Amino acid sequence: MKKLIAFLVLALFFAGCASKVEELSNATMPQEKLSVCNTQLPDYFQNSGKSAIFKRFPFVTLRKDVDVKGKFDDRFYAGLDLVYNAKNIEDVDFWKLRDEPKSLDYIYILPLWIKDYRKLTGDLFTNICYSYNLSEEQQQILKEWIAQGGKLWVEFGVFSTKYDLFNRNGEIAQAKIHRLVRSDLEGLRFLDTPYRTFLMRSKNLDFINYQSTYKAFEIDQRRSKLEGIRRLRVDIDNYLENYIVLEGEPLVVDRSGRTLVSIKSYGNGYIISLLPFEYKDAYFDGELLRWKLLFYTLKLQ
């Protein structure tokens, strides 16, 4: 009897296995062919088009995470055929630059928070380099790179919120902020070149609060070398901001006679300086200015 029961159990077990084998066999039988599309495009497609143009066009914003879309028709961007390499000064490999000076066409400098800026000498160029922790040898490499034909693009200034300095009693040190932002750019030169400062402040609501605003500039097109630039503006997002424009050949002049964009030769290279103009607003020409400035300076040898 026990043998009969054992036989029946084994028979049921193998019957179940056969059923599962049959099911697996049916599952693995050839099915109708399907076309699978890979949505991950190759790098050369991902890095093409308008977005790639702006990744290579870095002179527009302090924030690196901003998605710059551009305000012109797509045909404008499709027609651009520009070949150049540019890097922020803080991202430059200066040892590579020493050995391969033609690896970069532009090095650009953007404004600094007042607490990140180090005023150690009477030369603003040197102070900026110290602020980015560049050694004296690296500073010399940068100077030689410009002299050999490089282009230093300077949109420099210092800025402060209303909450960066406090008195001992805990009150906002408003007078100290004004003095610091003003004095840190006064009485200096930039590689022996004098410059003009533009001090701007946000709208003061009360002793503690302030509201972002902007400064607009009407352009004198007769005195400007970059055609078609009519209005520019600087967004003032911090409490106090102080910017520079070097003395040099005026490229854009406002109706008050102030040079807003200049260019100055340094050896075989150039130093370009301008205010950090807003670039998104359709009623101002910040983006157009930068394209025209890029076209203009790329032709310089």
Image (cartoon, rainbow, N blue to C red):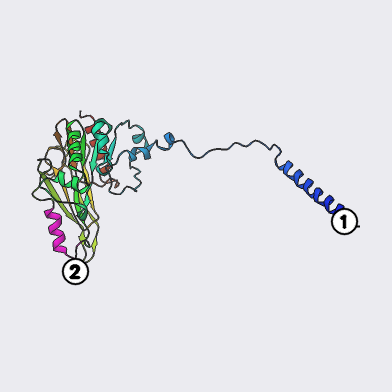
Measured in 3D between alpha carbons, the distance from the residue under mark 1 to the one under mark 2, in whole angstroms, is: 94 Å
Kindly indicate the quadrant of the structure image that contains residue 83.
top left
Residue 62 visible, this orientation = yes
Q: Which residue is mark 1?
A: 5
Q: Is residue 294 above or below residue 181?
A: above
- Dot 2 falls on a residue whose secondary structure is loop
Q: Which residue is mark 2?
A: 171
Checking the image for residue 300, the label placed there is: none
Q: Position of residue 1 (x, y in %)?
A: 91, 57
Residue 285 visible, this orientation = no
The amino acid on which the numbered mark 2 sits, given as a three-letter code, is Glu
| Residue 15 or residue 39, whichever sits in front | 15
Q: Quadrant of the C terminus?
A: top left
The amino acid on which the numbered mark 1 sits, given as a three-letter code, is Ile
- Dot 1 falls on a residue whose secondary structure is helix
Left or right placement of residue 7 versus residue 209 in this view: right
Mark 2 Cα within 10 Å, few/some/many (few <14, many 20+)? few
Q: Residue at x 28, y 42 (%)?
A: 91
Q: Position of residue 282 (x, y in %)?
A: 29, 45
Mark 1 Cα within 10 Å, few/some/many (few <14, many 20+)? few
Select label 1 or label 2 by which is in front: 1
180 falls in the magenta region: yes
The segment highlighted magenta reads 164-184
Q: Are marks 1 and 2 in contact (CB under 8 Å)?
A: no
Sequence-wise, the earlier of marks 1 and 2 is: 1
Q: Position of residue 11 (x, y in %)?
A: 84, 50
Q: Position of residue 117 (x, y in %)?
A: 19, 51
